[in-house]
Image (cartoon, helix red, strand yellow):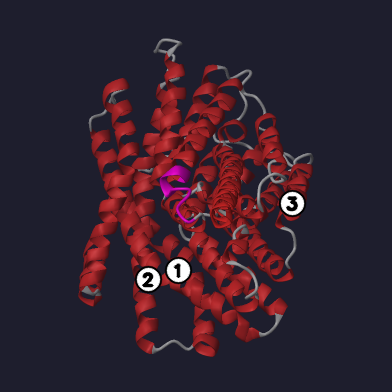
Amino acid sequence: MLTLYIGSVFVFLAKKMEVSRIKNLLITFKETIFSSLPLAAIVLLVCVFIAPLADPADYLKLLIGYLAVTVGQTLFLVGLESSILPIGKIVGQSLIKLKNLWLIVLCGIVFGFVVTVAEPALEVLARQTHLVLDAVDIHAFVWLASAGTGLSVGFALLRLMKNWSIKKIFALAYAFVFAMILIVPEEFVGLAFDASGATTGDVSVPFILALGIGVSQTLSKRKSNDETFGIIGITSIGPIIAIFLYGLYLFISRQGNLPLNDIYDPAISGGFMSILQDNVVAVALALLPVLLAFIPFQIFIVKLPRQKFIHLMLGAILVYFGLLVFLSGIDYGFAFAGKYIGEVFLDPARPSWFRYILLIISFFLGMAITLSEPAVTVLGDQLEELTNGHIKKMTIRLTLALGIGCAVVLSVVKILTGINILFFLAPLYLVAVLLMKPSSQLFTSLAFDSGGVTGGALTSAFLTPLTLGIAQAVALQDPANAQSVLTNGFGIIAFISVTPLIAVQVLGILYESRAAKQEAQDIADEKFHLAELMEEEGE
């Protein structure tokens, strides 16, 4: 019945879609397949050649999961471009009609909240967390992290209109975050940073950026577009604090009793279609708040023509089915693959040196997933445009990919050694904050924005089960000395979120140094030619 219903919806959408939209769908599908090939190649290398799967039926599970993820992501991205993104721009540009600073901030809070609730990466992380700790309610986790995001978006818009120094805000905010760590349960430290990265993904990042640019163009016309960057960096701070508070609440309300599940198993029983059916309502509840929040704007403020409004709603249907298929593919195949790769290299039946291959695999997995994230591509395009082509988009993509490859390796080392995550994160964030002094405001803002965009849905879908699988294997090998899976397994997105802060600022310092040298050389050449002309005139 569900299959027939979904098929009828797709037939309806196909009739309504123009030829250009169908062509765009095919192009996006091709690009999605191409960008995901490095990840698919690594999975095949491990599961076919290095450590073949014991059950041949699992290969079919991987194939179905991969196809579902790519098809779902394609539908999601096409629908995003025709619905969620235009809604973000329309809302941002129409906020000036409110003519009230605090009402604009309130709208930023509301839209920041509802768009994050629809973020697939956050939903994936919440599900993985619940599998480890029953006390964490999936909906409470998503809504609290989204509330933290919404408050941060409101503050970011206020910062933009008040022209407050973004460097001072970053320094003070992260000083407050690390001060809170002193009272937060250890189990929620890495998890909170993971939530921060997961809240800024394929849905929220484009929408929030569009909202910020719209406000900048209308209320702060004297500002240049590059001053609007940094809104994602500020947005990433709120979820950290929100999950810290949630962890404190659970710890106090349960008097420190937070029992963990003995076995972390992301595999969901049943076939793909049954998983799809189970996700129908959950995905609808995730996307519906965005549309409900936009309808009052449409009725009272925006008043779009009927045809354009219907066009936006049809795009939202594509977003819904894209998310539905995407998340179901993750539940069915991707989470299983990540956990398997995480555990197989620590199998006691294999030689002790086998675990070191995991470090190499982790590095290339980090690179492959970064190159597959659509938001990273968008960031590269923006940076190439801002630097007039001096920094190519492939340069920033490779820079982020190398940095995140190293971040994944550091995360695996942290799990294998059991070293507290703060011994890694504190120095890395300190370096990032110190680099703000020689870095320009543009590259500081871009750096903190890039830290948010790298923790997308693919990252949460694959790398979180990977690290949880490694943590469980470590715990099973030495139960007496092992940390909990929750404490040791989470934190991968935290590493992925901090390395771009360093990489992009260093790239910016190098770019600006080269640009300054080029400018000085151009001035010297101009003076030399002017002197030659004067000598010729003198003769």
Label 3 – label 2 distance at C-alpha: 35 Å
Question: Is disc 3 surrounded by few (<14), some (14 to 19) or many (20+) residues within 10 Å?
Answer: some
Which residue corresponds to mark 3?
173
Pointer 3 with pointer 2, Cβ within 8 A: no
**Counting residues from the N terminus, which is met first, the one under dot 3 or under dot 2?**
2
Residue 406, visible in the rendered structure: yes
For the point 59% across and 55% down, the residue is 538
Q: Amino acid at mark 3?
A: Ala
Q: Amino acid at mark 2?
A: Ser
Segment tinted magenta in the rendering: 388-396
Which residue corresponds to mark 1?
85
Q: In terms of secondary structure, where does tag 1 sit?
A: helix
Relative image position of residue 315 (x, y in whole percent): 35, 71
Relative image position of residue 234 (x, y in whole percent): 65, 56
Label 3 – label 1 distance at C-alpha: 28 Å
For the point 55% across and 78% down, the residue is 93
